[in-house]
Amino acid sequence: MATTLPTPDSADNDTIAWVRVSSVFLPLANPISDAKVLTGRQKPMTEIAILFAEIETRDGHKGLGFSYSKRAGGPGQFAHAKEIAPGLIGENPSDIAKLWDKLCWAGASVGRSGLATQAIGAFDVALWDLKAKRANLSLARLLGAQRDSVRCYNTSGGFLHTPLDQLMKNTDISREKGIGGIKLKVGQPDFALDIQRVGTIRKHLGDNFPLMVDANQQWDRPTAQRMCRHFEALNLVWIEEPLDCYDAEGHAALAAQFDTPIATGEMLTSVAEHWEFIKNRSADYLMPDAPRVGGITPYLKVAALAEHAGLMLAPHFAMELHVHLAAAYPTEPWVEHFEWLEPLFNERLAIKDGRMLVPTRPGLGLTLSGQVKAWTAQSVETGRRA
């Protein structure tokens, strides 16, 4: 008896018809300083460079994605994205892994990590957004959500430029909003100031409220040993980036020696770089950043490796994206609550009882705000809209 094969639906035959990439500079209300500023390695941050990718198919399906750069690099990301964008035209938007590889090899001579793949990240996120919208599912549901909300902690109120009295007010504001944890920046040249600030905030919050610290790579190995030993008594959720972001051996030694978990990974820009930390047990909490590693496609590879190794997860920054990805991780993760990107979008994430609610709108559930146009420095289109 002959078997009748199903007729492919329009999704199977749809193709990418139009792509727009935009370079947007988001101004920050106040200059931001962490330990890298106090050690003279960087200047205070006054804006964030956002790379947006908008994709539309022949059948009218749309996707929105973004990548970003803090301080230098935004124009470079845009230039690379503009150059490789034509490679998407005519391709099936469902072939996300294939398209990632195509775009990666198009610019492989300048590297398969860093700026080159961060440019790809905007397209990759847009393709996943499009796929979820076409399925009428949130991105979290498309990936296979484990939960409807994720633990969240606030960082934006705990930077080193913030005076101690304001720091305490900021922690109160965060708790009143329902945020479930507080992270403080450390790594000052005068270590006694770090000890004083963290000790004061621990007393202010109480012994059991989730508290994290972040040294932003500014300690050497002996200093990290001393500071981790001191902070061991403060019941911290983690100590983040105590050493240079590529020092897998040093982080592994700290993770093995101290009960307080060690967290790192936000500055790593490829699956290979994360694997070095995973296989060496260099972190208790791995902190991948989807835009920095090249989008959702490589992020999922990092998450799978982390799950296999039994690591906890706390994706870095970009909560509007990472709340979906964290919702799909088997072990309860943390998401970093940053208000900085909120002016870019019309939607807001909801917080309740220490947790960030996962949006139920299709895709990422994001649309660009009217303010984005005024902050757009460059924009280029390729192909034709349906």
Image: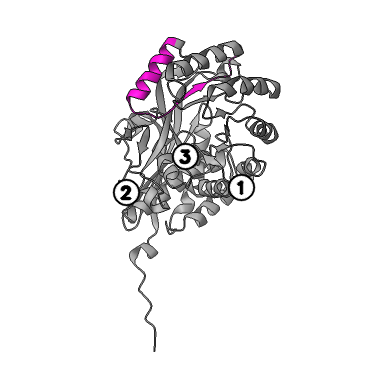
Please say if the residues under marks 2 and 3 sit with CB atoms less than 8 Å apart: no
Give the crowd class for mark 2: few <14, some 14-19, many >=20 residues within 10 Å: many
Disc 3 target residue: 333
Give the colouring mode of the picture.
one colour
Percent from the top left, x then y, of residue 290? Answer: 49, 41
Mark 1 or 3 closer to N-term? 1
Instruction: Give the side of residue 23 with respect to residue 271, left or right.
Output: left
- Residue 221 lies in magenta, yes or no? no
Q: Amino acid at mark 2?
A: Pro
Boundaries of the magenta span: 165-188
Where 270 falls versus 385 (above or below)? above
Comparing 1 with 291, the one in front is: 1
Where residue 180 sits, quadrant-wise, is top left
> Is there any visible trace of residue 39 in the rendered image?
yes
Q: Is residue 178 magenta?
A: yes
Residue 19: x and y, percent? 40, 48
| Residue ID for mark 2 | 362
x then y, percent, for residue 157: 42, 20
Q: Quadrant of the C terminus?
A: bottom left
Residue 184, given in percent of the width and then of the height, sits at: 49, 21
Query: In terms of sequence position, does the residue under pointer 2 or pointer 1 come before the other?
Result: 1
Circle 3 — which element?
A: loop
Q: Give the alpha-carbon distance from disc 2 to disc 1, as whole Å.
A: 33 Å
Q: Tell me the mark number nearer the camera, choosing from 1 and 3.
A: 3
State the residue in front, 373 or 362. 362
* Residue at 31%, 46% in the rendered image: 360
- The quadrant the N terminus occupies is bottom left
Which residue in the structure is indicated by mark 1?
Answer: 108
Circle nearer the N terminus (2, 3) = 3
Q: Amino acid at mark 1?
A: Ala
- For badge 3, the amino acid type reads Pro
